[in-house]
Image (cartoon, helix red, strand yellow):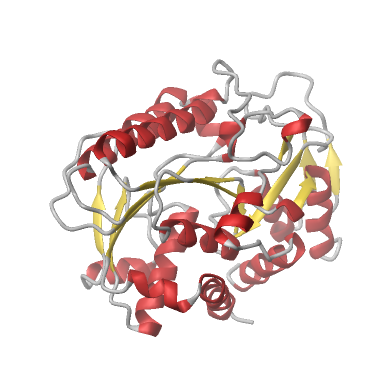
Amino acid sequence: MSEINIIEQDWKEVILNVGSKRLKNFSKKTILITGANGFIGRSLVYFFIYLNENFSTNIKLILIAKEAKFDSKISNLIKNKKLKFIKHDILKKTSINEKIDYVFHLAAVISPKFNSTNPVEALKINVIGTENILDALKNIKITKFLYFSSAGVYGNPDKKNIPTKEEFNGNVSPVSFRSCYAEGKRAGEACTMAYFRQYNLPINIVRPAHMYGPLMRLNEDVTINYFLNCGLAKKDIVLQTKGQDTRSFCYITDVLSIVLLVSLMAKSGEIFNISNEKAEVKIIDLAELICKIFDNKIKVKIQEKSKTNFFKSPMTRNVPSMEKVKNVLKFTPKITLNDGLVRIINNLKLNK
């Protein structure tokens, strides 16, 4: 299966999940995407391009990013004025002088290393950056503003709050080495809800957990990327803990399906988790699974660190509940962790 077929298969699944009738609401609309260089931002861009190329939806895309790190396809569309790119640091005020229908606000840095070594900037991106975008849009009549928060806002829930529902207020330390990200997202949520209540901006919030898919950049320092890089390089996976913490991973087709369903809701002021409870896995088991998919040509080694690891997340178990998504959006995540990883690995091998 070629790269194009793998990605096209994903987009076709999203269309089936959301429904072509619903997706027609995006036809001839202008969509603004901040953080368009990130994994989910790029995935959204690719999906909307796919709709334009195959269903003549005539969607206008405006992409905001600090740097133009786009691949050749997106760069060519920008060059040929099929997409509009605005190079802008969201820590600076901006003005938007054209009609905008949908906004996907993704601008943030998820890198544990960046958030641990640049906590001031990380905090500002989530708080001041979000305020700047909201302020630029408060007088524009938009259809929906979707704020991408994080399941990190829950911190380290107690056992009775796992799986964690949207109503849980969180157990987050404001002073830990990683608090700039979690507290920044919490402040970002407060900011968006303030604009929703005071300026009537039609805002919804999503709280993604651990997302993965073919358009990930493997140079980003997150766990699953490290494991995949080891497999491709035929190097053993080295864990600095016993890997007993668990995470729930959500494949891109399920992520985008929830994102689009939430953005198309008539009701605003709603919050939804993005996760897959059935794809909860211990870190050690995730490493072993990736070794198995790579035909056991690599293995897992544990070399625990005795010193404090500032980059380690304080969360021991991260499993957002999908109950509200199932009941309100009538959607259930479908892709198993094994199937999602196989798709990514097949894609990576083709582009090694």
Q: Is residue 311 left or right of residue 18?
A: right
Residue 243: where, in percent of width, then height?
81, 38
Residue 138 versus residue 249 in the image, above or below: above
Q: Quadrant of residue 136?
A: top left
Q: Is residue 173 left or right of residue 309?
A: left
In percent of the image, x 84 and y 52: which residue is there? Answer: 288
- Most extreme residue toward the top is 175
Residue 169: where, in percent of width, then height?
58, 28
Q: Nearer the viewer, residue 254 or 129?
A: 254
Q: Quadrant of residue 14?
A: bottom right
Residue 7: where, in percent of width, then height?
54, 73
In percent of the image, x 19 and y 40: which residue is there? Answer: 94
Query: Would residue 33 be seen by someone viewing this image from the given angle?
Result: no
Q: Nearer the viewer, residue 170 or 42?
A: 170
In percent of the image, x 37 and y 28: which residue is there? Answer: 124
Q: Quadrant of residue 239?
A: top right
Residue 307 versus residue 186 in the image, above or below: above
In percent of the image, x 63 and y 57: which residue is there? Answer: 326
In the rendered image, the quadrant that contains the C terminus is bottom right
Residue 132: where, in percent of width, then height?
26, 36
Q: Nearer the viewer, residue 41 or 230?
A: 41
